[in-house]
Structure formats: structure tokens, C-alpha cells
Amino acid sequence: MDATDSDSALLTSAGRMLETFARRLPEGTSEDEVRRALTTTMTALRERCGVETAVRQLVGVLHQLDEGEATGRRREFQRNAPAVGRLLEALQEDLLPLLRRAGYQV
């Protein structure tokens, strides 16, 4: 498997991770915004078009959700807080470096 195949496999894996996370989100306005950003990012990764914008939007809405819900306004979010943290961590440690290596400005 060459670097391109490896990067493609990692992007596919990242897309699956995003899809799984989207299915686990509870109903709610903030969560719907995250779900839309996840869908946009998955589409951008699959089509290799608009990736930078989609990833920036996704990271932004995840940070907003994480910061807004960390105040404890909604108990249901407390169950999902670890998942948001894991997704942000995975984006920062796995997806963003991969995209940078591939030449994306994220």
C-alpha cells in the first residue's frame, strides 16, 4: 500500500468515525448544527472538494457545542461530552495532520 492508498484508507476511516458520531448525537438545535457540519465534512472528504472549509466549520461547531454544554445547561449532553472530546481529539491528532500532509490548509 503506497502513501496515497494509506491516506485514502485513513480518510475513509475518518469518514466512518464522523458518521458514527453523527448517529449518536441526541436531538437538539446545537446537535443538528453539528450533524450538518459532519455531513458536509464527510461529503467534502469523499469528493475531495471544499475540505478546508468543511473541516474548519466542523471544528468550530464542535468547540461551540463543547464550550456551551460544558456549563451544564443540559444534562443529556453530559452523557455525550466524552464523545465530543474524543471526536475533537481524533480530528486534531489524526484527521488534521493527514489533511495537512495531503496539502490541505486546515
Image (spheres, grey):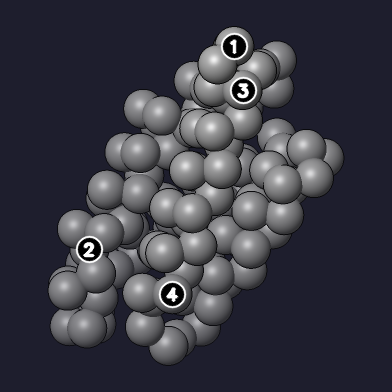
Classify 10 Å Cα crowding around label 1: few (below 14), some (14-19), many (20 and above): few
At horizontal 31% and vertical 57% (from top left) the residue drawn is 84
Name the secondary structure under disc 4. helix
The outermost residue toward the bottom is: 27
Do labels 2 and 1 touch, CB within 8 Å?
no
Q: CA distance from mark 2 to mark 1?
A: 37 Å
- Give coordinates of residue 76: x percent, y percent: 22, 83
> Do the numbered discs 1 and 3 sit on residues whose CB atoms are within 8 Å?
yes
Q: Which residue is mark 3?
A: 5
Judge from the rendering whether residue 79 lies leftward or rightward of residue 38; answer left or right: left
Ranked by sequence position, the earlier of labels 1 and 4 is: 1
Q: Earlier in the sequence, mark 2 or mark 1?
A: 1
Q: Amino acid at mark 1?
A: Asp
Judging from the image, what secondary structure is the residue with disc 1 in? loop
Q: Is residue 63 at least partly visible in the picture? A: yes
Quadrant position of residue 104: top right
Q: Position of residue 14 (x, y in %)?
A: 49, 43
| Residue bearing the label numbered 4 | 23
Q: Which residue is mark 1?
A: 2
Which image quarter holds the C terminus?
Answer: top right
Q: Which residue is mark 2?
A: 81
Q: At 55% from the left edge and 16% from the top edge, which residue is drawn?
A: 1
In this picture, residue 59 sits left or right of residue 87 = right
Q: Disc 1 and disc 4: Cα gap in Å?
A: 32 Å
Q: Earlier in the sequence, mark 4 or mark 2?
A: 4
Left or right side of 31 for 43: right
Cα separation, mark 3 vs mark 4, equals 27 Å
**Which kind of residue does numbered mark 2 sit on?**
Ala
SS for dot 3: helix
Q: Amino acid at mark 4?
A: Arg
Upstream in sequence: badge 3 or badge 2: 3
Q: Residue at x 43, y 75 (%)?
A: 23
